[in-house]
Amino acid sequence: MEEIRVESRISKKELFRFLLYHNYCRVIGIVGLVFSVACWIGAVWTFGNVKIGNTVLLLVLGALFTVYQPIMLYRKAVVQSRHPVFSKPASYVINDKEIVVSQGEDSASITWNELWKVVGRKKDIYLFVDPVRANIIPRSQAGKNAERIMEVARKQMDPSQVKGK
């Protein structure tokens, strides 16, 4: 197989998308959204039947997971994007055996069976090394190689470890 070469630079936009995915596509994120919707429904349903303070409390609790948390995730993305590791582009060399990531003079490799999972989203590919850390490859920077990366992942990894397109 011919090596796939991709160079990417991660901005706060890609970090924010990753943080949103990572927080809202897990069980706790879904529970938080359901909780928020339930609070808002409760606020509308009980409006006028309870003290206004109780209704306001339900509205505030409902905003925790749908308004406050995304704002905090965006702030976190802004802070993280200022880290020196994001100031330089990362180069990926992908083949059937491994993924080699280089940045400046640093280089690391990981075999496909050492990856935790690969997630292909509409705008990004996430190469998870464990449940919380992932390398982000924006599809806009990978171009046609994005589909090739997903094809190699499907060939080299268990189907349960590869999600998306």
Image (cartoon, grey):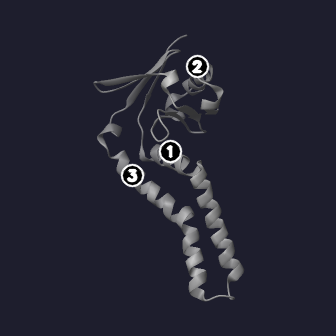
Q: Are marks 2 and 3 in contact (CB under 8 Å)?
A: no
Q: Is 127 placed left or right of 107 in the picture?
A: right
Q: Secondary structure at mark 3?
A: helix
**Where is 91 relative to 17, above or below?**
above
Question: What residue did someone put label 1 on?
Answer: 18
- Dot 2 or dot 1: first in sequence order is 1
Front one among 77 and 57:
57
Residue 31 x %, y %:
62, 58
Q: Residues within 10 Å of mark 2 (few under 14, many from 20)?
A: some
Residue 156's tag is 2
Front one among 148 and 32:
32
In which quarter of the view is residue 53 placed? bottom right
- Dot 1 or dot 3: first in sequence order is 1
Q: Secondary structure at mark 1?
A: helix
Question: Mark 1 to mark 3: distance in Å?
Answer: 13 Å
Question: What residue did someone put label 3 on?
Answer: 78
Residue 87 x %, y %:
32, 38
Residue 116 x %, y %:
52, 31
What residue lies at 55% left-to-right and 62% top-to-bottom?
A: 65
Three-letter amino acid code at the position of disc 2? Gln
Q: Are marks 1 and 3 in contact (CB under 8 Å)?
A: no
Three-letter amino acid code at the position of disc 1? Phe
Three-letter amino acid code at the position of disc 3? Val
